[in-house]
Image: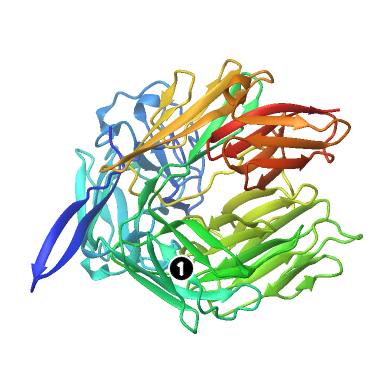
């Protein structure tokens, strides 16, 4: 079976007693980690510029056949009936990507790689083939962009004319990309066939040579006024420094980062049979960056990905301490785009709904009780938005790429969300997607619950508020060097897909694990009692001696005592709706549940000793 793989080859280079470490980085994509007939190839980008219906295969059916589309993940053995014509078989493995002929016009379909760092000695190769020559050979071009994934941003490197793909056998195409060394690039394969049939692509391979160590630097500012903060301590990988009088810092010789498994699922509660969508959120070469100074809330970002052998400019903002009920959003980004704008949509407050942004900055003491505290138009940030008093209803926070170019996905933008207890969430801009708007999160003003969205969209959020489901979002991460996934769903079933679906047929409490592999290391994440099927599915014995809850007689206060430090707590209805989500510290909590209606609830507790679920009732 093919996989996305990373080969790491260390080369010791000696000159005048100075030693440097360089590594050969190879990004391979065989499309084996995708669902059969998927149109979403994230973190790849697909663009259907011709927007025409497509031709299908006679006497064969499969999802999305005849629809307008660009490239589709194709498994000839999964069609109905299965195809046994060797002409459609992948170069290797079970899957490939194909572009079907547009009906009535020439194809204009784009398959665009994730952002790839070109060090030195860079090259790219892939295999192409025409399914048949009966209607003419398939035609294609190859382009490179150093800015974004818009078609007009690509420089065609395959020559003034199109290339044809043979029908007799697979052909490997190789391009020398040394002209782009030292840059971050996108590689595009554009299908420009003229009423042919099926253009086939497989086994993409990008190779470059990078240094093993990186540099990180930037400026630390006050989130409320943008002023530089001297004397703030910044740490990464055990290396620490203090900002100078202008708030600047720099840390060199940062080693390669970690392989970090992570995943989410939706839903995680419900009745049998329960269909669950699992989403891989793992990252590679990531570090935790922290920044602190007395009088400010500590900044922590656990998902900082450093470009190997290169410099990352990471500007940080420290937020002054908040009051009870405050929620603050702090946006930072790179030099470009020059202007990203924070926007907040509020529920109805005193008879009106509000849109808080640079042209309507809001108010602290009157409706909407939210304000754009600091706005900047020259890159880097911070842009700071604070809700000073939550009102019942639904809020949406999003970021607009006012500059429009380059893409917001290239901005290195980070939003930090703070509450009275400190940092609640760190949200990094997705690495793929098209549109000028970044929908960061929604907020339930009644409960204070924050629902991370993290989507790139074409239009701003409409303000609608969907029913909350525990971990009902899927974060987007660049995982281009992770090559395999092994899921264990806890009921005897497994999967090697990146983002599988699984149906739990029986009631019970299920522990889920994910093992990821990048060709060098393997890491595993286990979530105990993660999926709860049926109202009686919780194993009370597992938490009996580690987490104890008791309700004070005649009151709406729960006393929660844990053997380990309580990190996060959620109250979830039996239907799966999240009613409260908060971060905590300490081993004992007094929790007011007066806002709940009478009924039975699940208390999901994340502690330093593990994750636990308990039932409780309010009458």
- Left or right of 30? Residue 614 is right
- Camera-side residue: 455 or 417? 417
Bin the neighbour count of mark 1 within 10 Å (Cα to Cα): few under 14, some 14-19, many 20 and up.
Answer: many
| Residue 407 position (above or below residue 530) | below
- Camera-side residue: 196 or 363? 363
* Residue 554 appears in the picture as rendered: yes
Label 1 element class: strand
- Left or right of 503? Residue 394 is right
Q: Which residue is mark 1?
A: 234
Q: Position of residue 303 (x, y in %)?
A: 46, 55
- Camera-side residue: 437 or 292? 292
- Left or right of 618? Residue 574 is left
* Residue 175 appears in the picture as rendered: no
| Residue 175 position (above or below residue 507) | below
Residue at the extreme right of the image, as rendered: 351
Residue at the extreme top of the image, as rendered: 506
- Left or right of 567? Residue 390 is right
Q: Position of residue 568 (x, y in %)?
A: 62, 43
> Split into 4 quadrants, where in the image is the C terminus?
top right
Q: Position of residue 130 (x, y in %)?
A: 28, 42
Q: Quadrant of residue 13?
A: bottom left
Q: Position of residue 347 (x, y in %)?
A: 81, 56
| Residue 383 position (above or below residue 289) | below
């Amino acid at each position: 079976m093919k996989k996305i793989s990373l080969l790491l080859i260390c080369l010791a280079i000696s000159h005048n007693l100075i030693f440097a470490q360089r590594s050969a980085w190879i990004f391979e994509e065989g499309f084996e980690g995708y669902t059969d007939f998927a149109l979403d190839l994230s973190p790849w980008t697909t663009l259907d510029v011709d927007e025409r219906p497509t031709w299908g295969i006679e006497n064969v059916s499969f999802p999305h056949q005849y629809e307008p589309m660009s490239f589709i993940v194709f498994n000839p053995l999964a069609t109905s009936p299965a195809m046994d014509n060797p002409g459609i078989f992948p170069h290797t493995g079970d899957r490939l990507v194909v572009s079907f002929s547009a009906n009535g016009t020439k194809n204009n379909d784009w398959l665009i790689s994730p952002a790839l760092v070109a060090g030195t000695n860079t090259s790219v190769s892939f295999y192409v083939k025409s399914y048949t020559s009966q209607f003419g050979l398939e035609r294609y071009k190859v382009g490179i962009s150093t800015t974004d994934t818009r078609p007009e941003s690509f420089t065609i490197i395959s020559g003034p004319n199109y290339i044809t793909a043979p029908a007799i056998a697979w052909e490997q195409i190789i391009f020398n990309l040394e002209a782009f060394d030292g840059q971050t690039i996108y590689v595009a394969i554009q299908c420009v066939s003229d009423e042919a049939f099926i253009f086939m692509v497989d086994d993409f391979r990008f190779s470059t040579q990078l240094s093993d160590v990186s540099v990180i630097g930037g400026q630390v500012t006050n989130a409320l006024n943008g002023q530089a903060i001297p004397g703030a301590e910044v740490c990464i990988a055990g290396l620490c420094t203090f900002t100078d009088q202008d708030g600047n810092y720099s840390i060199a010789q940062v080693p390669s980062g970690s392989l970090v498994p992570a995943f989410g699922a939706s839903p995680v509660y419900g009745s049998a049979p329960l269909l669950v969508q699992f989403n891989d959120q793992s990252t590679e070469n990531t570090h935790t960056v922290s920044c602190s100074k007395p009088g400010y809330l500590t900044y922590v970002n656990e998902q900082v990905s450093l470009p190997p052998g290169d410099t990352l400019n990471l500007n940080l903002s420290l937020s002054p301490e908040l009051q009870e009920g405050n929620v603050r959003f702090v946006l930072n980004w790179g030099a470009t785009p020059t202007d990203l704008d924070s926007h907040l949509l509020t529920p109805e407050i005193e008879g009106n709904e509000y849109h808080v942004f640079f042209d309507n900055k809001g108010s602290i003491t009157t409706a909407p009780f939210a304000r754009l505290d600091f706005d900047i138009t020259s890159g880097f940030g911070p842009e700071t938005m604070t809700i000073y008093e939550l009102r019942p209803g639904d809020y949406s926070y999003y970021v607009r790429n006012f500059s429009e170019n380059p893409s917001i996905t290239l901005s290195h933008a980070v939003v930090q969300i703070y509450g009275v207890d400190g940092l609640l969430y760190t949200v990094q801009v997705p690495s793929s997607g098209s549109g000028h708007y970044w929908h960061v999160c929604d907020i339930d003003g009644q409960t204070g619950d924050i629902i991370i969205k993290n989507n790139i969209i074409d239009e701003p959020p409409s303000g609608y508020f969907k029913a909350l489901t525990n971990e009902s979002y899927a974060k987007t991460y660049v995982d281009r060097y992770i090559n395999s996934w092994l899921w264990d769903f806890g009921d005897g079933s497994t999967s090697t897909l990146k983002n599988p679906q699984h149906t739990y047929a029986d009631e019970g409490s299920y522990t889920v694990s994910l093992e990821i592999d990048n060709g060098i290391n393997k890491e595993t994440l286990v979530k105990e009692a993660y999926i709860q099927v049926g109202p009686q599915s919780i194993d009370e014995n597992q938490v009996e001696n580690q987490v104890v809850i008791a309700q004070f007689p005649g009151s709406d206060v729960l006393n929660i005592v844990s053997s380990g430090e309580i990190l996060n707590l959620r109250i979830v209805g039996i239907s799966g709706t999240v009613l409260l989500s908060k971060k905590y510290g300490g081993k004992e909590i007094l929790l007011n549940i007066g806002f709940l209606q009478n009924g039975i609830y699940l208390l999901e507790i994340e502690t330093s000793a593990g994750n636990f679920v308990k039932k409780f009732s309010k009458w």
